[in-house]
Image (spheres, coloured by chain):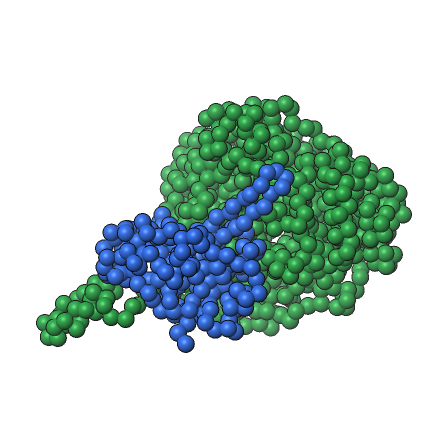
């Protein structure tokens, strides 16, 4: 826009000057003067630091505002998680802010639940309905019958609301549907989880091992930066993936493993490290418990034993084990992120942890770090009144003894009457699109229809909103202030999310919504602050920091903390033995294998292929697929099919097919990518596409959703994770 | 000495994420459907012996620029530091340059002129938006006439190539291999 106004003015000046001065200014008009570069004038009149919410990594950004509009978003150079750089999603945040499909007013349902028929109402009306339902369900069934499903950094206000209300049923799908098994696997081994941002030091690693992790397609900013820096330093890259991922394209060794056999490979690697004396003997002797049991356990798990199981040549297994051994302890065996694959995921991630222990890489530079967070006292809230209710997420007569968080899938199951220890009657859903997030969407639909009440709080009219009785439009991350961020990280910091521009339409920030509900149900004493910035100021003041200084720069950085044993961190392990448990006493006591055991998984029936899912770099699952700016690069997903599999099925590159799974469930039509980059026994689909919600006018009907194909899932008996790589698909012409 | 701006991109680090594409669109207010840069990921070989090369592509600011030679109005011209620029006032949108460009680096702006990468010359050679956003730090921009610059060092120490050298245009965007 800036350009047309400038040129208009110039033309005007030239025409007026022409009368007085003749040709001089006319030539300027025709541009015959010195060449000039056109300034797009997107720098704006204000630059406001905040942090991103296009995914959950929370990179510091600088938002440029011009005439009240955000023109562009750049990385904040002061912020340790962005270092001034961003992934495409972070750079595309304006596509969310100015999405024409945004929820604009509170809505209430007018027809049958799930038919997506709503009428707009005022905030008071909508909030009164939510408050009434929360009071009623509390009175009739107890507060524990109202569950909160949440994801995203704005959820803290609602977690607080539910704690004060008295419900222990607060769950994020990021646990049982994503990272949970890994946290438990590492906890059982080192007495500590991996956390997010992951405590790995790829920047200084001499060897990086990715098992299914597809960095470069999975764009957690700092991780990709560290991976690239490791690569630039000449780190040996080993990628284990049935698909030739972007990361595999960078690797020195690509192991195209048969899916579902990773534990066999991990055991064989341990065998080589021990048999060839390549493990870190001093480290293991000093810190580890159960080495002799492990040695006996893997004695016969040779590369030759693993070969027929994994399809990987023994020489390749030996060569890669030796590369790790040579680089130890500066080896990152990446713990993975969405690790819910086959139901034995805690054991697989434990095998990764054990491998890391043999390499001596936990607590070492170039391996796993032991970071700490900056001091930031909690807000001095009143104590929560605990009513002693257990969570509802365990099946009747069953349990997941080592789960350390509530299971979103379990709470969903508990909503189908009679399935669990008690029934859940009400849902509040904040920022998580459960129909596309939980496996077995038919079960999710049953739960939704059984509910007494459901309220959805979101920015966009995602599928879950279509099922809600009341929909509350939240302001986007660029229009609101959220909880302060002070994670454990090698360069600890405190970051602020603040309002860059005022909320558009009638949307409101989450803190306001939670506070308004609290005031309506007699819990105002738990929300003693006027707004979230007052809350933030209080906490910062208690830590001795100046809020205005933080708001000016977006981040307060602490000194780099010691993160390794060499730097003076004490080697302490909060496991039962006080050591790194190669042999897990906790698992043994709970009746599970104390050391990971390889068990074969069901294979695809003839004509079917295992469905593998992952990411594309421009999208964060379904949260960004309606973002028109990001969609200019990628506006639908493709199903990756090997050349041989496509020939056998008679499907061509670029054609559209429907994926049909083993139970007859069908996807939406999706374009075929015929490629050499995947095994014949698998197909790959990026998650987050195939929306059906009417309100997502851009994303609706683009690509295919994998959730509808996950009619089966394998539950991890240790912690209740839902492994989804157990579904098989064939093709039907669209 | 007059600077000679070049861009050097490390294909070994690039992950083809397209952050450079998105940031360029917002930095330069590029209209919907138009791109000043784009990314290709090229795979060679048969399973499992495969290799991939990722490249972020854009106008090559060629030393011998057919777009300039074929522009009837002088809109496409040699800009600061040897870059190729388009004067939007002089451009009539005739598309001669689009036909002449071996790299398909240009598009018609909805307001009637031709648009393409400027090397962010509104920053006067200080940096480009794509260079600053790139999470893999694979994009380098600078003055090849300055022997101490990062781009000079990279071109002196690493193997590199240009896209379609056979076009004879002497591109100023180099790819480290």
Pick the quarter of the image with the N terminus of chain A. Answer: bottom left
Tell me what residue is drawn at x 31 percent, y 49 percent: B99
Tell me where residue B29 sits by quadrant. Answer: bottom left
Answer above or below: position of A328 versus A604: below
Residue sitting at x 68%, y 42%? A255
**Residue at the bottom extreme, as displayed:** B1
Closest to the observer: A506 or A25? A25
Position of A232 compared to A125: left or right? right
Tell me which corner region of the image, top left, top right, bottom left or bottom right, holds residue A591.
top right
Report x, y in % for residue A274: 84, 49
Q: Residue at x 76, y 43 (%)?
A: A315
In the rendered image, the vertical position of residue A24 relative to residue A324, given as above or below: below
Q: Against A385, is A391 above or below?
A: above
Q: Say which chain is blue.
A: B
Q: Position of residue B58 (x, y in %)?
A: 42, 55
Say whether residue A681 is left or right of residue B53.
Answer: right
């Amino acid at each position: 826009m800036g350009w047309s106004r400038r040129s208009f003015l110039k033309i005007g000046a030239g025409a007026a000057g022409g009368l007085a001065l003749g040709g001089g200014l006319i030539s300027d008009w025709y541009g015959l003067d010195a060449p000039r570069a056109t300034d797009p004038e997107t720098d704006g009149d204000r630059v406001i630091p905040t942090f991103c919410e296009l995914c959950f990594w929370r990179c510091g950004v600088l938002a440029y505002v011009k005439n009240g509009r955000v023109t562009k978003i750049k990385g904040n150079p002061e912020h340790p998680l962005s270092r001034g750089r961003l992934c495409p999603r972070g750079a595309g945040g304006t596509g969310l802010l100015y999405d024409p499909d945004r929820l604009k007013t509170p809505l209430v349902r007018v027809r049958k639940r799930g038919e997506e028929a709503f009428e707009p109402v005022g905030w008071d009306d909508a909030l009164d309905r939510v408050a009434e339902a929360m009071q009623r369900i509390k009175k009739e069934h107890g507060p524990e019958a109202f569950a909160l499903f949440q994801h995203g950094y704005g959820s803290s206000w609602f977690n607080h609301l539910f704690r004060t209300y008295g419900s222990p049923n607060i769950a994020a799908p990021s646990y049982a549907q994503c990272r949970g098994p890994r946290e438990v696997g590492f906890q059982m081994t080192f007495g500590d989880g991996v956390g997010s941002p992951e405590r790995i030091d790829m920047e200084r690693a001499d060897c990086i091992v990715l098992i299914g992790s597809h960095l470069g397609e999975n764009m957690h900013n700092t991780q990709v930066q560290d991976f690239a820096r490791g690569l630039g330093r000449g780190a040996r890259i080993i990628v284990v993936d049935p698909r030739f991922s972007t990361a595999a394209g960078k690797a020195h060794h690509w192991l195209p493993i048969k899916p579902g056999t990773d534990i066999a490979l991990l055991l064989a690697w341990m065998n080589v490290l021990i048999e060839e004396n390549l493990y870190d003997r001093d480290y293991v002797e000093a810190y580890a418990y159960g080495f002799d049991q492990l040695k006996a356990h893997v004695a016969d798990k040779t590369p030759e034993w693993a070969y027929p199981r994994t399809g990987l040549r023994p020489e390749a297994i030996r060569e890669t084990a030796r590369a790790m051994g040579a680089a130890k302890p500066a080896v990152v065996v990446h713990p993975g992120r969405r690790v819910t694959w086959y139901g034995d995921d805690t054991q697989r991630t434990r095998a990764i942890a054990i491998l890391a222990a043999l390499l001596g890489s936990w607590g070492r530079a170039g391996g796993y770090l032991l970071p700490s967070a900056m001091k930031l006292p909690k807000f001095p809230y009143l104590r929560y009144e605990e009513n002693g209710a257990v969570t509802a997420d365990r099946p009747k007569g069953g349990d997941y003894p080592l789960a350390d968080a509530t299971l979103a899938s379990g709470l969903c199951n508990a909503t189908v009457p009679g399935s669990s220890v008690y029934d859940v009657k009400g849902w509040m859903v904040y920022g998580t699109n459960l129909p596309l997030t939980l496996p077995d969407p038919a079960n999710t639909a049953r739960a939704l229809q059984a509910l007494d009440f459901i309220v959805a709080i979101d920015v966009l009219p995602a599928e879950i909103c279509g099922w809600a009785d009341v929909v509350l439009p939240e302001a986007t991350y660029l229009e609101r202030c959220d909880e302060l961020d002070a994670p454990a990280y090698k360069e600890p910091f405190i970051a602020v999310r603040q309002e860059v521009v005022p909320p558009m339409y009638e949307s409101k920030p989450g803190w306001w919504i939670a506070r308004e509900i609290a005031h309506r149900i007699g819990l105002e004493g738990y929300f003693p602050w006027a707004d979230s910035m007052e809350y933030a100021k209080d906490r910062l003041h208690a830590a001795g920091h100046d809020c205005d200084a933080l708001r000016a720069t977006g981040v307060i950085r602490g000194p780099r903390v010691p993160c390794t044993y060499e730097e003076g961190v004490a080697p302490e392990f909060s496991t039962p033995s006080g050591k790194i448990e190669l042999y897990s006493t906790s698992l043994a006591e709970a009746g599970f294998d104390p050391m990971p055991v390889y068990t074969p998984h069901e294979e695809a029936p003839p004509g079917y292929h295992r469905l593998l899912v992952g990411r594309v770099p421009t999208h964060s699952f379904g949260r960004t697929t309606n973002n028109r700016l990001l969609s200019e690069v990628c506006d639908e997903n493709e199903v990756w099919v090997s050349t041989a599999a496509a020939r056998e099925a008679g499907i061509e590159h670029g054609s559209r097919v429907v994926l049909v799974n083993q139970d007859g469930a069908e996807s939406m039509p999706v374009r075929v990518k015929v490629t050499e980059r995947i095994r014949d026994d698998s197909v790959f689909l990026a998650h987050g596409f195939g929306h059906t919600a009417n309100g997502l006018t851009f994303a609706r009907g683009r690509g295919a959703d994998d959730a509808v194909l996950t009619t089966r899932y394998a539950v991890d008996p240790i912690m209740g994770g839902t492994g989804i790589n157990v579904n098989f698909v064939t093709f039907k012409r669209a | 000495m007059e600077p000679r701006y070049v861009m050097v991109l490390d294909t070994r680090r690039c992950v083809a994420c397209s952050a450079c594409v998105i940031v360029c669109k917002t930095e330069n207010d590029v209209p919907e459907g138009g791109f000043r840069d784009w990314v290709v990921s090229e795979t060679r070989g048969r399973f499992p012996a495969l290799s991939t090369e990722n490249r972020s592509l854009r106008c090559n600011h060629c030393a011998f620029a057919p777009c300039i030679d074929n522009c009837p109005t002088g809109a496409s011209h040699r800009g600061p530091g040897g870059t190729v620029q388009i004067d939007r006032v002089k451009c009539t949108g005739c598309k001669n340059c689009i036909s002449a460009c071996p790299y398909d680096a240009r598009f018609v702006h909805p307001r009637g002129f031709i648009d393409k990468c400027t090397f962010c010359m509104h920053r006067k050679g200080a940096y480009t938006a794509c260079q600053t956003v790139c999470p893999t730090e694979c994009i380098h921009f600078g003055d090849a006439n300055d022997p101490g610059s990062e781009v000079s060092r990279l071109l002196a120490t690493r193997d590199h190539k240009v896209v379609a050298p056979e076009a004879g245009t002497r591109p100023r965007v180099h790819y480290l291999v």
